[in-house]
Image (spheres, grey):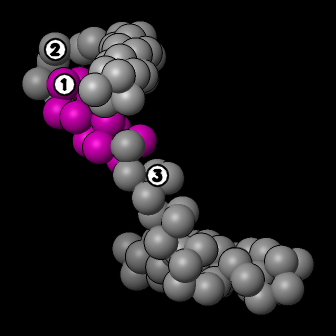
Amino acid sequence: MKNRERLAYWLRIAGAAVFVLLLVAVVDAASRGSFLEPSNIVRVLRQITYNCILGVGQTFVIITAGIDLSIGSLVSLTGVVWRRLRMHCRSAASDS
């Protein structure tokens, strides 16, 4: 019985992989072939980098039993402070 469960598990994994590949092919066809261009892949990877870093950090916090789900407010605060700092630095550079 253990072999049947293992086979069923790997069939589900293979089915999910085939589904994802088909989904990527459909999206690529719908976007007239521009979805899988290297420039688009780089752009998508750059956009998800921040979320991946935050997710890894949050995972470590949850694993160490310091459960803290307030990362969203910290990201918002950091974004506002960064934007204001950039605006201040630009205006200071244009004044001199």
Q: Of the residues shown, which amino acid type is indicated by label 1? A: Val
Q: Amino acid at mark 2?
A: Gly
Residues under numbered marks 2 and 3 in contact, where contact means CB atoms less than 8 Å apart: no
* SS for dot 2: loop
Main SS class of the magenta portion in the image: helix
Task: Give the extent of the magenta segment.
Answer: 51-62
Q: Which mark is residue 61?
A: 1
Q: Residues within 10 Å of mark 1 (few under 14, many from 20)?
A: some
Give the farthest residue toward the left: 64
Instruction: Name the spot of residue 92 as percent of width and height, x first.
Output: 31, 21
- Category of crowding for the residue at label 3, using alpha-carbon neighbours closer than 10 angstroms: few (below 14), some (14–19), many (at least 20): few
In front: label 2 or label 3: 3
Depth check, front residue: 58 or 78:
78
Q: Circle 3 sits on which residue?
A: 48
Depth check: 22 or 90 in front?
Answer: 90
Residue 38 is left or right of residue 30, and the answer is left
* First-in-chain label (1 vs 3): 3
Q: Residue under label 2, please give it.
A: 66
